[in-house]
Amino acid sequence: MATAPVYCICRLPYDVTQFMIECDACKDWFHGSCVGVDEDDAPDIDIYHCPNCEKTHGKSTLKKKKNWNKQDTGQSGDVRPVQNGSQVFIKELRSRTFPSSEDAVVKLVGSQLTLDYLEEHGFDEPILVLKKDGLGMTMPAPTFYVSDVENYVGPDVLVDVVDVTKQTDSKMKLKEFVDYYYSTNRKKVLNVINLEFSDTRMASIVESPQIVRRLSWVENYWPDDALLGKPKVTKYCLICVKDSYTDFHTECAGASVWYHVLKGEKIFFLIKPTSANLSLYERWRSSANHSEMFFADQVDKCYKCILKQGQTLFIPSGWINAVLTPVDCLSFSGHFVHSLSVDMQMRAYEVEKRLKVASLTPFSNFETACWYVGRYYLERLKGESPSYLVHGAKIINGAFRSWTKKQALLEHEDELPENMKPAQLIKDLAKEIRNAEVRRFPAADSSDNESLHIDTEAKTEVKGRNSKASKKKGGSAAGILDLLQASKQVGGIDYSNNSQPPASPSTQEAIQGMLSMANLQASDTCLQPAWNNSQAKSNSHGGSTGRKPAGGAGSSNGKRPAKRTPKKPRKSSSVDSVDMFDDDQDHLDACFKDSDYVYPSLESEEDNPIFKSRSKKRKSSDDTPYSPTARVGPSIPRQERPAREGARVASIETGLAAAAAKLSHQVSVFPTAQRERT
């Protein structure tokens, strides 16, 4: 019977369960455990020589590593990008320089970090406290070490262990990890970052900072008799060996986090949670090869903060951070959500949900915590409340509305607390928010209900006293002024200096009287644009046109006048302009119509049933009559429509003359009315 072939220096048959590597010299196969080659390191080996062949062929050689950018050029298919957390990566990371955290981190003494301080200055930047004195925090004695953690927590407790090189995690008994920690031959870089011990004996010797306990939603508003489990995020023990690395991340649910280094040292790489940076982070994290890209290279600034033994660091909500452990380190931390950063917490939570990335430090039942806080806000807002609480209540009530929509309820109902009436809470909370805003800003409560934005135009042609009078008066003076402004808009900027208006002297005298009532003076420059524009339009039609003896020029080919060029609106707005718009429109209707002619841009609704359905309140329609006083909404090009049969277009100057003739019959009435108004 043939015997099975044997391999390796152990001379044993092939075993499918064991990793083996081939020698490029003798072509024999060797067990990785026999020749000291780890399976994870094998892809990085270019040429392998077994222990016997090393004597004649030299040592094994590794593949060349990529540069810091880690972008594959495609020129060498066997060269792998540098992985975040690998030894090459750690070496490069240590050699790089970063902006100092002095520009981003606030330094305080423990006694300064109070609720009053945070309410006044906010909690938007990391806070570094050099000594724990004054923080109201309890920590073990300096002699406490990793073996003591095993004694307090229990040797058989399963912990999540991260393989830093591969950035993967696995389960291991705490005793096994402690043995690895104290071993002198660490073949891998392993660390523990999520040992939550609030239910163990070690909880009695570690207490979070007082400000954290004061702010935490979980510790303050979660009922003791709640059926849903309270999130276990308040007390973590971190055991990290040298060169441990945690890649860039935000804390789950947008939580803030505190760290205290009991032994060793940590280096934090901090990135501000601007809208741009959060968008970049989401895109980077959702990429399939994000572990081959150093995220700090994609943002404008990444700050380096060194946390030494005995120091405490507080990182606000949303800050994107990575952590490097330069030496063996034992530290403690905790996560907390609070009312000072509701907006950022919700933003980070939505990013987290879209990414759907599993975390070793999840914030379970975050939405449940929000419901309990909403119930607290309902009672708190009945009295005097700081502005950040009112703002937080608005954000959280908006989230409630989103979570309870019909299409979203199925996804969120599992985190709805028992005996909670969400619809009633949303309604009552909205009422208390309004009441709180009324108490703080009595005159501005109606601002949230304003949905109409009106852009008014500055009248550059008429200044000073006349401009003010035109806005205040609702009579014929304002209408005439608007008519003059409209004539200038229609006339454009290309006038013929040789043309003269056809109005008779008596007509010009009547117009002069009307203008004097409007506090204006008639001149050739006022009347010229209207007449010249009429000529320009007549010439542009290209057909035969003629002037009527007493009515002015007009074209009967049915084309509309040239569209008016809108002025650039100024940014100010006022709801009062709506009334002014309606008043001006009434007077413009009267000025632009007479018994013989109808002007297409200002027709009466009774003349054509097509336009009867238009409401006078819809000022933003495509065919709204022009008013130089106000414009509602954006300018939209008017669509061409056929002119009514029998309608004729007349010049603006003819309209002035017709209006003057009508007003001349009331010459004895207008001066009296004018004096009464003034």
Image (cartoon, rainbow, N blue to C red):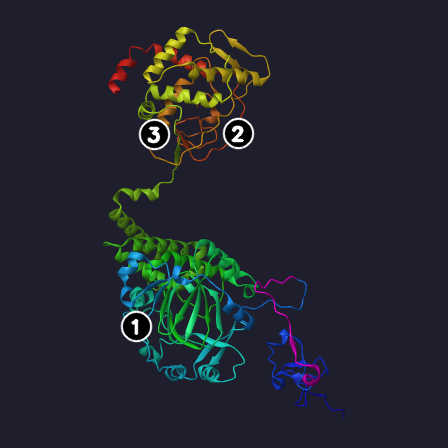
Q: Does dot 1 land on a helix, a strand or a loop?
A: loop
User: Where does the N terminus fall, quadrant-wise?
Assistant: bottom right
Counting residues from the N terminus, which is met first, the one under dot 1 or under dot 3?
1
The picture quadrant where one finds residue 363 is bottom left
Part of the protein shown in magenta? 53-73
Name the residue located 38 percent from the left edge and 40 percent from the top edge: 451
Label annotation for residue 639:
2
The picture places residue 507, in percent across and down from the top left corner, at: 40, 9
In the picture of the structure, the residue carrying the numbered disc 1 is 137
Q: Which residue lies furthest to the right in this view?
A: 1
Q: Does dot 3 land on a helix, a strand or a loop?
A: helix
In the image, is 493 to the left or to the right of 450? Answer: right
Label annotation for residue 30:
none
Name the residue located 64 percent from the left edge and 72 percent from the top edge: 63
Counting residues from the N terminus, which is met first, the one under dot 1 or under dot 2?
1
**Above-or-below relation of 656 to 179:** above
Q: Does dot 2 land on a helix, a strand or a loop?
A: loop
The picture places residue 269, in percent across and down from the top left corner, at: 45, 65
Name the residue located 37 percent from the left edge and 60 percent from the top edge: 125
In the picture of the structure, the residue carrying the numbered disc 3 is 579
- Give the residue type at disc 2: Gln
Instruction: Tell me the distance, in whole angstroms, between the alpha carbons under discs 1 and 3.
Output: 63 Å
- Of 495 and 371, nearer the camera is 495
**Above-or-below relation of 675 to 641:** above
Query: Can you see residue 420?
Result: no
- Give the residue type at disc 1: Met
Question: Is residue 181 located in the magenta-colored stretch of the structure?
Answer: no
